């Protein structure tokens, strides 16, 4: 019985660990999605400015204005590079969080299997004890009164 209680405690701790891992996974996925969205916005911004530059070049553009466009595009490119690094990092962290959650779930299932086995073994042991008592009772019921004493 003490082993079952210890196993139950381990199952409870495992469930808490799995819940914690699931929460971390959810946060990591949200951070990854945010990083991906920011990256997409920067890329879209760069595309818009590239189109504007092409339009201005077609219409005529002073060298100073052209240089300003180029400097701004370079800043956007650096921001995109930085955001790509952030997105890559958040993707890696999300993958690691998913692996941690999967490991916690697997461990939790293993503890649940052990609890189930222990419960079945306890039930078999109790059933054997009951059968033994019933057999003894039946054996005594079949004996003459003088033999029982």
Image (cartoon, rainbow, N blue to C red):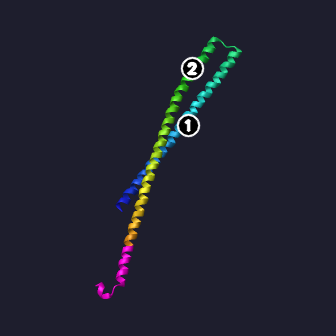
Magenta-highlighted residues: 131-149
Q: Residues within 10 Å of mark 2 (few under 14, many from 20)?
A: few
Farthest right residue? Answer: 59
Residue 105 appears left or right of 76: left
Residue 140 appears left or right of 113: left
Q: Which residue is mark 1?
A: 33
**Residue 53 place in picture, x, y as percent:** 65, 19
Q: Quadrant of the C terminus?
A: bottom left
**Residue 32 place in picture, x, y as percent:** 53, 36
Task: Determine the secondary structure under disc 2.
Answer: helix
Q: Are marks 1 and 2 in contact (CB under 8 Å)?
A: no
Q: How far apart are the alpha carbons under marks 1 and 2?
A: 25 Å
Looking at the image, which is closer to me, 119 or 79? 119
Residue in view at x 70 percent, y 16 percent: 58
Question: Which corner quadrant of the image does residue 141 belong to?
Answer: bottom left
Nearer-N-terminus badge (1/2): 1
Q: Quadrant of the N terminus?
A: bottom left
In the image, is residue 90 part of the stretch drawn in magenta? no
Q: How many marks?
A: 2
Residue in view at x 53 percent, y 32 percent: 87
Looking at the image, which is closer to me, 116 or 93? 116
Residue in view at x 61 percent, y 18 percent: 69
Q: Which residue is mark 2?
A: 74
Residue 113 appears left or right of 65: left
Prevailing SS of the magenta stretch: helix
Vertical order, 50 against 124 (above or below): above
């Amino acid at each position: 019985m003490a082993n079952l209680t210890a196993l139950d405690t381990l199952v409870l701790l495992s469930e808490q660990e799995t819940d914690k891992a699931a929460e971390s996974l959810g946060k990591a996925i949200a951070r990854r999605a945010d990083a991906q969205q920011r990256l997409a916005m920067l890329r879209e911004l760069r595309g818009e400015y590239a189109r504007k530059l092409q339009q201005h070049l077609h219409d005529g553009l002073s060298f100073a204005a052209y240089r300003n466009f180029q400097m701004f595009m370079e800043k956007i490119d650096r921001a995109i590079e930085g955001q790509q690094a952030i997105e890559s990092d958040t993707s890696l962290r999300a993958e690691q969080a998913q692996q941690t959650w999967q490991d916690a779930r697997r461990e939790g299932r293993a503890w649940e299997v052990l609890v189930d086995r222990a419960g079945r073994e306890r039930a078999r042991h109790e059933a054997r004890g009951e059968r033994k008592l019933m057999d003894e009772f039946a054996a005594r019921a079949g004996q003459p009164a003088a033999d029982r004493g």
